[in-house]
Image (cartoon, rainbow, N blue to C red):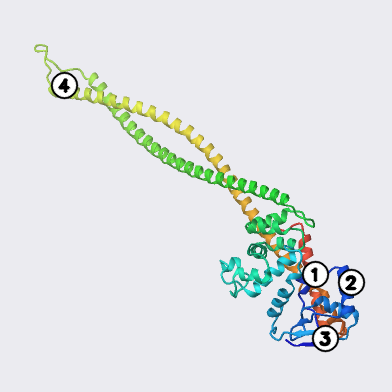
Amino acid sequence: MNITNLDPACLKEHARNTEFFDDITADDYARFKDSINNEGILTPLVVAPDMTVISGHQRLHAAIDLGLKTVPVIINESLSDEDSKLRALIAANFGRLIQTNSPKWTKATAEYVKLVGNQNGGNRKSECLGDTLKKSWDDIAKELGISRKKLSRAIAIENKLSEPLKERFYNGEIGFNLAADLLSSLPEHEQMEIFQNLPAGKKVTKREVDEVLYYLNEKDKAILEKDELIEKQSRLLKNKEGELAAKDQLRDAMKREIARINNELEDASQKLADSNMKIKQLENTPPRVETRTVEVRDKNDVLQLEENSKRIKNLAAQVNNAERKLSWLEKENERLSRQSQKDADEIEKFNKLKSDIEFLSKKKSDLKRQIKSATELSELTVQIQDMLETKLAPIKFKRTMETLDIGDVAVQNILEVLDRVDSWSRELRDIVGNNDIIV
């Protein structure tokens, strides 16, 4: 590639350079600038065709500070799109990241994997950040000069860590080892619980995370025990309801039996009364006999008397049986009445149990809704913060705004948008400040 000399003023920094790479320290920069002042720029800057700097941001800063008229530049004509420029930026400057496992090192690693893709790194959705599969994990690790294991740990943070925890990692509150080896291996709901229970604005320790995990484990155990209790009590309630239904059927059958026996008893009592009347009539009727023969004149009367006697005995036996059966039925009725009262008490107890089960189920559902709402709000917070610090950072538009007048259409448009943002902020602040929010 040919080297050409260009005015530093025509070069522009890559918009995402500071996202991945820090400037050198003030002391190092002072020595670096003195070296350039004495010896000049020995290594040409590498830029894209649109004059975006790929390699040489520190040299560009020094040249501008020193007032150099020209700097040596190599124009890489192949860097024609944003992805290729970003890929080249990371590859050219990755060695500057002295502190490996830092947030910017992790972000640069993950972004590079996303740009070049992975060929055989396992499950595409869970391990590869990009859609185009091109290189193996070993190839990518070799290009970056790191081990395959370290590459996988960086990808785990970028791909498996929840957005709120990832934001705290990039802010330096969570260490690389804690994020890669523990937090990224947890399911998302546990990560959100950890995010909500850890103190903000300070360095997170493994002990604090372990304490939250212990609390979550105990809470899960309690919820599981409640679920098992609810299931057990539900089965018990169902069985009791079946028993009560069977007892209700038996009680109805006994009532019908008592009614039938009472009808039979009434019939038997009536027959007994008729028989007693006939007996009295026979007793009051004098026998017709002749003094000479002492013989019954009418055999029909004798037969009738014998028949009545048998009927009286049979009816008496029936009455005795009916009385015993009625006595048993009355006792059984009393027992059933007591059992009915006992069943009513059990029904009241199980209705209370059922109400407790419904309360526990509702409480569990409310907890799930609270976790879901907190997760959605946390994601919104992270998205807003990310947009404000990256895409919408005012510093990115400062130079553009300085070249425009207040009357320009573009300026008026941005002012209208800012008014809408102010209105949105006030509305959201009112919602957040409302104590009657229902989750």
User: Which numbered disc, 2 or 4, marks the residue that appears first in the sequence?
Assistant: 2
Q: Amino acid at mark 2?
A: Ala
As displayed, is residue 93 above or below residue 201?
below
Gap in Å between the C-alphas at discs 2 and 3? Answer: 24 Å
User: Which numbered disc, 2 or 3, marks the residue that appears first in the sequence?
Assistant: 3
Secondary element type, mark 2? helix
Q: Label 1: which residue?
A: 22
Q: Whole-percent x and y of residue 157?
A: 67, 62
Question: Mark 1 packing: few (<14 Cα in 10 Å), some, or many (20+)?
Answer: few
Q: Label 4: which residue?
A: 302
| Side of 125 where 437 appears, left or right | right
- Residue at 30% x, 30% y: name it: 268
Q: Amino acid at mark 4?
A: Val
- Residue 10 is labelled as 3
Gap in Å between the C-alphas at discs 4 and 3? Answer: 149 Å
Q: In the rendered view of the protein, which quadrant contains the C terminus? A: bottom right
Gap in Å between the C-alphas at discs 4 and 1? Answer: 136 Å
User: Which numbered disc, 4 or 3, marks the residue that appears first in the sequence?
Assistant: 3
Gap in Å between the C-alphas at discs 3 and 1? Answer: 23 Å
- Residue at 85% x, 77% y: name it: 61
Q: Whole-percent x and y of residue 377?
A: 71, 62
Secondary element type, mark 1? loop
- Residue at 90% x, 82% y: name it: 67
Q: Whole-percent x and y of residue 135?
A: 60, 73
Secondary element type, mark 3? helix
User: Which numbered disc, 2 or 1, marks the residue that appears first in the sequence?
Assistant: 1
Q: Whole-percent x and y of residue 280?
A: 26, 21
